[in-house]
Amino acid sequence: MSADGDLTRTNVATIISNLQVVQITRPRSPRGTMCSMSEDDLVANAEPISTRRWDVDALRSGALICLVLAVPFTLLGLVSDGARVISFFGAVIGFIIGSGSAAWAQRCGTPLSHALVTAIGAYVGAQTVFVVLRLVTDRTVNWFGVFFTLSIVSFAGIVGGFLGSRMQAKGFAPSSRQ
């Protein structure tokens, strides 16, 4: 506290950082819309963040979204030669949405890490199944294509992580936290 007993921004940040890791949330009106925040609101709406490194529920739900949106587009590209470009971009958008949802839903304060792990993990899991199927059926595997697509999926994870991080910063929260 300052000499006259008032809480200053620096003193509040010091007190909070000494107690626990916190996340600042924006207040919501009764209708669920966001309200503006004063300096007092920033302190009053601090909620603890998990001290674990990974939010497994966020990773699991993000990976499920990635797979549900990306695998059908991938299968469409395997079946139809004319739809390969559309299916490729559809799968990439699925990875962006899935990794963004993991970044948005996580409560550990590491949205980009969660998004990257979600996108890369979902891709490696699905691609492992596709590669094994190709090897079992005596078809060739384009390893360059597998690793090139991994780099694009990694970029999609970064984009999704940025979008999920921005949603958190704007005060939007998943319905499970409201």
Image (cartoon, grey):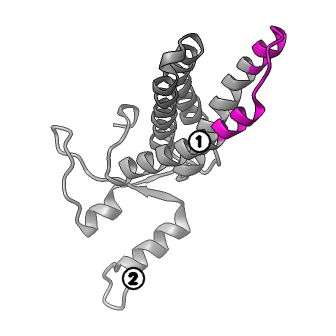
Residue beneath label 1, please?
Answer: 152
Q: Is residue 55 visible?
A: no
Residue at x-position 58% and y-position 35%: 59
Bin the neighbour count of mark 2 within 10 Å (Cα to Cα): few under 14, some 14-19, many 20 and up.
few
Query: Is residue 140 or residue 152 the one in the foreground?
Result: 140
Tell me: residue 140, above or below residue 45: above
Residue type, numbered disc 1: Ile
145, above or below 141, in the image: below
Residue at the outermost top position: 137
User: 27 and 138: which one is in front?
Assistant: 138
Look at mark 2 in the image and give the residue it sits on.
1
Q: Which mark is residue 36?
A: none
At 41% from the left edge and 80% from the top edge, which residue is drawn? 10
> Which secondary structure is most common in the magenta stretch?
helix
Image location of residue 16, percent across then percent down: 47, 67
Give the magenta range: 131-150
